[in-house]
Amino acid sequence: MSETTTAPAPDAQKRDRTHWLYLAVLAAVLAGILVGWLAPGFGKQVGELGTLFVNLIKMMISPVIFCTIVLGIGSVRAAAKVGKVGGLAIGYFLIMSTVALAIGLVVGNLLHPGTGLDIASHAKETAKYVKDAQSAGGTWDFVKDIVPTTLVSSLTSGKVLQTLFIALLVGFGIQAMGTTGEPLLRGVALLQKLVFRILTMILWLAPIGAFGAMANVVARTGLDAVKQLALLMVAFYLTCIVFIFGILGTLLRAVAGVSIFKLCRYLAREYLLIVATSSSESALPRLIAKMQHLGVDRGTVGVVVPTGYSFNLDGTAIYLTMATLFVADAMGKPLSWSEQLGLLVFMIVASKGAAGVTGAGLATLAGGLQSHRPELLDGVGLIVGIDRFMSEARALTNFSGNAVATILVGTWTNTIEPARVRAVLDRQLPFDETTMVDDHQAAAPADKNLVPA
């Protein structure tokens, strides 16, 4: 027995060589902070490195979503099963967004972090975000934008919902073809392996991107800007922590019997990547791969994860609530309870599809204020300096919410293997870091001694 349990060790060590990459990311983040602080001019110049890295990641998002959803739905013979998963996911997303909204309202009204601040010198910085909000359109524009111009443009426009829509159509189309569509599924499976291989190559550039991004943000905001708004930042981070480990953790333990702490440890490298890029989109492909490795059915992962990235915005909901109350207090024009509810419900609806995009939360905040309380719009400029840091907490919370949602929906629909979940979270079935594709899942039943009874 002992020989069997120790056999996977060499492979695990081989796969774990990528830990040097993530140590390099940590070092790059620290170096970026120092460069931005001590040499702000140079820090601003290297800021484009961070933008280029995030753009490389975003370049791969549409192919990853398309392949995952087509394979997930095309492999399921019963269309009703996919519909059940999607319905449960959407219902859960709506409930949790409401809970996140309520938590942000409570914390914002208890702390009043913006009271007594002077925002006149920052007002001019809102122009960019007002323009972004105006170009974004309303809720109906959001719905119309789901349908792409052409079938192929959905993969090139960079819009997640368009890719999701076309992937659903293709997946159900292949499903309806029966055995005739199997060669198409095999072709998409090969394409998915290629996409993940390219993405793995791109991730080795993460330290360069992290260095440029951190150097730029520190150079532009300075350490004083962070100190000035420390109360809002700390309150927001603590609220997100309570939401993840308190609300989501309790729900995960009660429904699936899974520890939120073990799940966070399993996703530690994805959290580090999000912190480095300030975008949860950078970790979307890895979340898909890791949820499949964890034991969640491919069809469930293919529906819940991409949909959650557009509709499950727990961190964004908390941010919009607290940021709005902060701006209103800083302007000396606090909102009544009725105004708070009306304005923020509008923001939650308007923010759908913006998850994971750096700066989208700020543009949504500006759009909501312009629509309901335009006299407060100038106050958005106050938090421009720290939005980068706020964006990290938003992205981490959104990401955690989607990971938990995948496990919960898998449990409710019986599309998850509890024994495999325990084995993976206990580090008995390590994730293949070299390819990000779980090619060893088929061999898992052979390692029966690794899976708790």
Image (cartoon, rainbow, N blue to C red):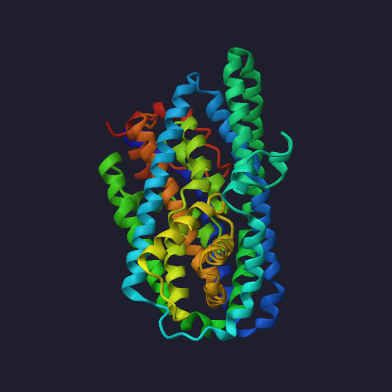
Residue shown at 30% from the left, 48% from the top: 259
Quarter of the image holding residue 342? bottom left
Where in the figure is residue 281, as x and y percent of width and height?
Answer: 57, 52
Identity of the residue drawn at 42% across and 61% down: 318
Tell which of 436 and 104 is nearer to you: 104
Q: What is the number of callouts on the image?
A: 0
- For the C terminus, the image quarter is top left
Work out whether residue 442 or residue 180 is closer to the camera in this orientation and state it. Answer: 180
Position of 34 compared to 411: left or right?
right
* Residue occupying image coordinates x 64% and y 79%: 124
- Near-viewer residue (239 or 264): 239
**Does residue 340 appear in this view?**
yes
Q: Is residue 247 left or right of residue 435?
A: left
* Vertical position of residue 157 compared to residue 239: above or below: above
The image quarter in which residue 74 lies: top right
Q: Quadrant of residue 103?
A: bottom left
Residue 47: percent from left, percent from top: 67, 70
Residue found at the very far top of the displayed protein: 179
In the picture, measured across the screen, residue 99 lies left or right of residue 435, that is left
* Image spot of residue 97 (x, y percent): 41, 51
Give the answer, above or below, for where 155 lies relative to 337. Answer: above
